[in-house]
Each structure stands twice: as C-alpha cells, then as structure tokens.
Image (cartoon, rainbow, N blue to C red):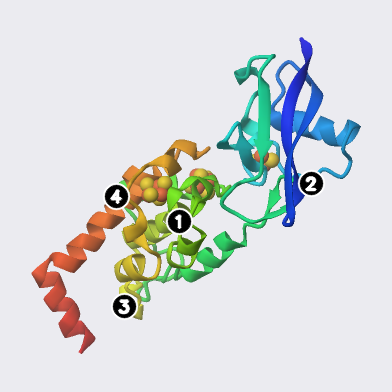
Amino acid sequence: MSYQARFKVWRGDAGGGGLVDYEIAVNDGEVVLDAIHRLQATQCPDLAVRWNCKAGKCGSCSAEVNGRPRLMCMTRMSVFAPEETVTVTPMRAFPVLRDLVTDVSYNYAKAREVASFVPPPELGPGEYRMKQEDVGRLQEFRKCIECFLCQDTCHVVRDHEENKPAFAGPRFLMRVAELDMHPLDAADGAGIDRRRAAREAHGLGYCNITKCCTEVCPEHIKITDNALIPLKERVVDRSYDPLVWLGSKIRRR
Ligand code: SF4
Ligand code: F3S
Ligand code: FES
C-alpha cells in the first residue's frame, strides 16, 4: 500500500526556524528516514539530514519523531496511523546546525574527559583473563552506537544548558561505570580515582535515576539499572566505608 503521509519537518538553522508542512508518498515497510529521503529527493534538495547505515548501527540519524528521541532509520511508518501527522525535529539538547542536523560536539568533549582504560602492568598481550560474567557485564555497555539519544533525553541537560559543563550525561557515566567495573583496569595504580572523578568531574550526583535514558536507548542497554545505579553504589561505598576512607588517606601520603 502507498499513501500520502502528512509531515511537519523542522527547517532552519542556528538563527531560527520552524515547522514546515509536507505531504510525502510512503510505501509499505518504509521507515521515517525513507520518507525524509524522498522529501529531499523530490521537494527539498537542500534539506539537511545526517545518516549513514540505515540499519540502526551508526547512530547518525538521531532526531525527535513526534517529540520522542529516536533513530529515524529504525522508526517504522507503520507505527503511525495513515491520517496522523508525523512531526520530525532535530535533537533538542544540542545546538542546531541546519534542519535536522545538530552539533553533537558536547558529547565528544565529554568522551575526552573520561580517562582511558589503563592496562595492567604485570600482564602482557595475550595474558588477559576475565570471568565470563565480567565479560558479559561489560559487553552490554559496548553495544552503544553513540547515537546520543540518551544524552538528548536526559532532563539534566535537555532544558538546562547551564548543567552541561558539570554533567557528562548517561552515555559517558556508563563509560566510567564500565571502566570502574573492569577487573583488569589498573587506573588506581596510575593515580586515577574513577569513583572520585564520577562524582566530581562527571557530575554523577546530578542523575536522579529518572531512567528516561534507558527508555530511549535503541540498543536496549539498561543504562540506569546496570551502569548508573551500580556506579552510585560504588561511589557511596568508597565515600562512606571508614576502612576504605582510611586506606585512601594512607595511600595518598
Ligand atoms: Fe545511544 Fe544507548 Fe549509546 Fe545512549 S547508551 S548513546 S542511547 S546506544
Ligand atoms: Fe538522566 Fe538517565 Fe539519570 S535520564 S537523570 S542519566 S537515569
Ligand atoms: Fe545509521 Fe540510522 S542511519 S543508525
């Protein structure tokens, strides 16, 4: 079946813009990105849209469809009634460059602030051994495609530009959790305190566990339950366990 779908697409740039009405032909089995491509091919050759894989794996086509952060290539048109108007807007938490394309460099800056994995000095290549349950736990976080939909949806920065300098966002707090849980990470020996950094440099305390990040993750990573809450528990253990506190004081002398 083919039909004419009604769309509202945000057009504009950093200087301002607004929603523009379009009618776009849609066929069975198509996704929102197909419709946006058809719009570009037939009516608006200057429409800016970012995409790459059209398979839910590159994380490029993030936008908001009817107000919900989504990958356009993984949002089937069949989830909307044919008479429904589908509204497509750029991610709200990041500055607009043009039309549906935003400047996501906040995320790259936050990525650089997380100290890298520190290889264990006593082990050489090929000597790393890990329990399967540790591998499984870390693998879940490695499924991240860096679409930044979780970053876009988190209320801490979505409507609060002023929080951005102090808050890494769910994707990068998850990265800190991944490294802190990594049994072979030797950050402590290199003078890197990941739990202190989570609290002080990456703003873990801003997260009040609303779980909106988990709800929009296209990889179905349990960001809040498996990364953020365990990280909060680990930070609290470190801060309030008197033996751990004493040990850290002695070590620092
Ligand atoms: Fe996207 Fe999920 Fe990675 Fe966040 S954690 S950037 S929502 S894949
Ligand atoms: Fe934000 Fe996710 Fe925490 S949406 S408040 S990072 S649980
Ligand atoms: Fe790659 Fe949508 S185009 S995730």
Asked if disc 2 and disc 1 are in contact, CB closer than 8 Å, the reply is no
Q: Kindly report the distance in space between the C-alpha atoms of the residues bearing marks 4 and 3.
A: 25 Å
Marker disc for residue 48: 2
Marker disc for residue 229: 4
Marker disc for residue 181: none
Figure check: 182 above or below 146: below
Q: Earlier in the sequence, mark 4 or mark 1?
A: 1
Q: Nearer the viewer, mark 3 or mark 2?
A: 2
Q: Residue furthest left?
A: 242
Look at mark 3 in the image and give the residue it sits on. 189
Element under disc 4: helix
Q: Earlier in the sequence, mark 3 or mark 2?
A: 2
Q: Kindly report the distance in space between the C-alpha atoms of the residues bearing marks 2 and 4.
A: 38 Å
Residue 145: x and y in percent read 56, 47
Which residue occupies 80% across, 24% down?
24
Residue 220: x and y in percent read 46, 37
Q: Nearer the viewer, mark 4 or mark 1?
A: 1
Look at mark 1 in the image and give the residue it sits on. 169
Q: Residue furthest bottom?
A: 253
Q: Nearer the viewer, mark 4 or mark 3?
A: 4
| Front-most of residues 144 and 44 | 44
Q: Quadrant of residue 44?
A: top right
Q: Residues within 10 Å of mark 4 (few under 14, many from 20)?
A: some
- Is residue 235 toward the left or the right of residue 123 in the image? left
Element under disc 1: loop
Figure check: 171 above or below 222: below
- Is residue 91 toward the left or the right of residue 153 in the image? right
In this figure, what is the number of numbered marks? Answer: 4
Ligand 2 lies under 8 Å from the Cβ of mark 1: yes
Q: Residues within 10 Å of mark 3 (few under 14, many from 20)?
A: few
Ligand 3 lies under 8 Å from the Cβ of mark 2: no
